Image (cartoon, helix red, strand yellow):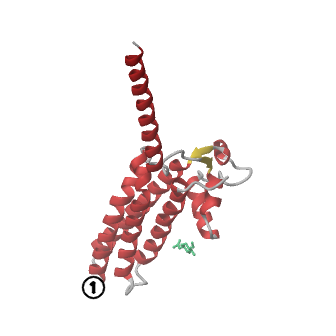
Amino acid sequence: MTKPIGSLAAAVVAALLAGQCLVAAAGDGIVRCAPVPSMTAEQACEAVCGTAPMLRLCLRTLLPRGASGHDDDVGGAHRRRDVVTHYVGVAARRALDGYAATAAAKREMQYSGALPADERTAHERCMAGYDLAVRFMGRVADDLASCETAARLKDDYAGSLSGMDACRRKLFGYPASPLYGRNLADRNKTMLVGLLSTLVTSPPET
Ligand SMILES: *[C@@H]1O[C@H](CO)[C@@H](O)[C@H](O)[C@H]1NC(C)=O
């Protein structure tokens, strides 16, 4: 009777070992997904923003109006800690808002009819870049809770940025176009998403 028990025990041990291997392998595969760090918006912005304008954009994006001031802290927002994926999502939605506003401005100019044909064509081509960026950024804004989305962040950010750059190349000949300045601002919003994404994919050592 010891033999069956022995083999049962061996089977259990084998199963446990297999389980451990599985966990270890999965741990290697998803190491960037977990655990997602939590911090305040200010900590997140300060961790990733290298320039004063980017830091201002970041704080404006992540904190409700007035919340970054010392005596004007709306609902204690600047002391609240959140998972960094939340901040990436907020920044992504802000970037999408920027893309939409630029697309609306473009349509308005188109309808005004005052645009020379070549500039009109440049605007159309710029918007093709925006369509691309909307698709990629939409994936970032949609669902950051799942591990796969977090793992895909870098690619989605790169796709969005390449859309912004595609637009910019079409507008190089038209620096006076209102779209040119809008595109630069949208590009910065896109870059902010990329900067904040680095907190998800490679949490800072603490
Ligand atoms: C974009 O960001 C850079 C620095 O990060 C800043 O110098 C520039 O003024 C910003 N441009 C716009 C249009 O916001």
Residue 159 in the figure: left or right of residue 206: left
Residue at the spot x=36%, y=64% of the render? 133
Q: Pinpoint residue 63: horizontal percent, then vertical percent.
A: 60, 52
Indicate the amino acid at tag 1: Asp
Residue 114 seen by the camera: no
From the viewer's side, name the closer residue of 78 and 142: 142
Residue 117 in the figure: left or right of residue 199: left
Residue 181 in the figure: left or right of residue 109: right
Q: Pinpoint residue 37: horizontal percent, then vertical percent.
A: 58, 47
Residue 185 seen by the camera: yes
Instruction: Please tell me whether residue 100 is drawn above or below residue 28 in the rendered image.
Output: below
Q: Quadrant of ligand 1?
A: bottom right
From the viewer's side, name the closer residue of 175 and 47: 47
Q: Pinpoint residue 82: horizontal percent, then vertical percent.
A: 58, 44
Query: Which residue in the structure is indicated by mark 1?
Result: 118
Q: What count of labels does the image hold?
A: 1
Q: Pinpoint residue 117: horizontal percent, then vertical percent.
A: 25, 84
Element carrying mark 1: helix
How many residues crowd around disc 1 within 10 Å: few (fewer than 14), some, or many (20 or more)?
A: few
Location of residue 171 by image quarter: bottom left
Quadrant housing the N terminus: top left
Q: Which residue lies most toward the top here? A: 1
Residue at the spot x=27%, y=85% of the render? 118
Q: Which residue lies most toward the bottom here? A: 173
From the viewer's side, name the closer residue of 104 and 145: 145
Residue at the spot x=37%, y=81% of the render? 169
